[in-house]
Amino acid sequence: MIKSSKLVTILSAVAMLALLSGCGGDDDNGDDDNQISVGTLSSLPSSYTEPLVAYSASDSRVFNGKTYTRKIGADGDFKTVANTFDVEFDASVSTPYTITTLTRTEAVDITEASSEHILATVTYDFNAGTEHFKGTSSVNGTIDCVNTYMTPLPLLISFTDEIPEYFDDSTLSSTTCPNWINEDDNSEPLSFTGVFNTTINGTSHISTYQSF
């Protein structure tokens, strides 16, 4: 489902294309009867679907009949690495680097291997420790719930890959979400499109787009 660990699995599948590892999907299309109409990514608020900073590096390739696309942009204390899907610290930034505030938004359009279609926004406030899901599942209906975790901030990092993207599941303290949101699911979806915007210390941004 759309639990953070599920999104990590999806994004890892896209990133692993550089190594041409197995990215095949499940051919089981499930039962489409009585599914709820969900809509498309363009029906979500533009504050979620548009990048905060222009994409300046991208990659696209076809593998196992699917086209995998990645884009990334950064500003402020960060910059993109030319010709790769990665960011690094700006030359003026000294490390270790302290993250005092961090927010992240996601707009995701997922068709699961079971044919369940999920369209949702997710808002992360790492200072408050909250993860807010809002959207629609073609099987489970309306989503509007919050997971609350222990905050990881302030956080001292030496490398950009240490910037948190999701909360540590082991620090979950409370939830208003149904079980299907938080359950583990390691199967690769039939299709996925996501826009991810991260704001760090108020003035620095990282925007990414991934799809297959």
Image (tube, helix red, strand yellow):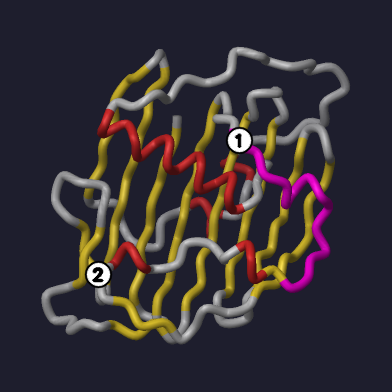
Magenta-drawn segment: 173-186
Q: Residues within 10 Å of mark 2 (few under 14, many from 20)?
A: many
Residue 103 left/right relative to 92: right
131 relative to 13, above or below: below
Residue that appears at 58% across and 79% down: 151
Residue 6 place in picture, x, y as percent: 59, 44
Verify whether residue 92 appears in magenta.
Answer: no
Q: Which residue is mark 1?
A: 110
Q: Secondary structure at mark 2?
A: strand
Residue that appears at 37% across and 29% down: 68
Amino acid carrying label 2: it is Phe
Residue 27 place in picture, x, y as percent: 60, 13
Residue that appears at 26% across and 31% down: 19
160 relative to 62, above or below: below
Residue 85 place in picture, x, y as percent: 26, 47
Amino acid carrying label 1: it is Ile
Residue 98 place in picture, x, y as percent: 34, 85
Q: Nearer the viewer, residue 137 or 8?
A: 8
Q: Secondary structure at mark 1?
A: strand
Residue 131 left/right relative to 156: right
Q: Residues within 10 Å of mark 1 (few under 14, many from 20)?
A: many
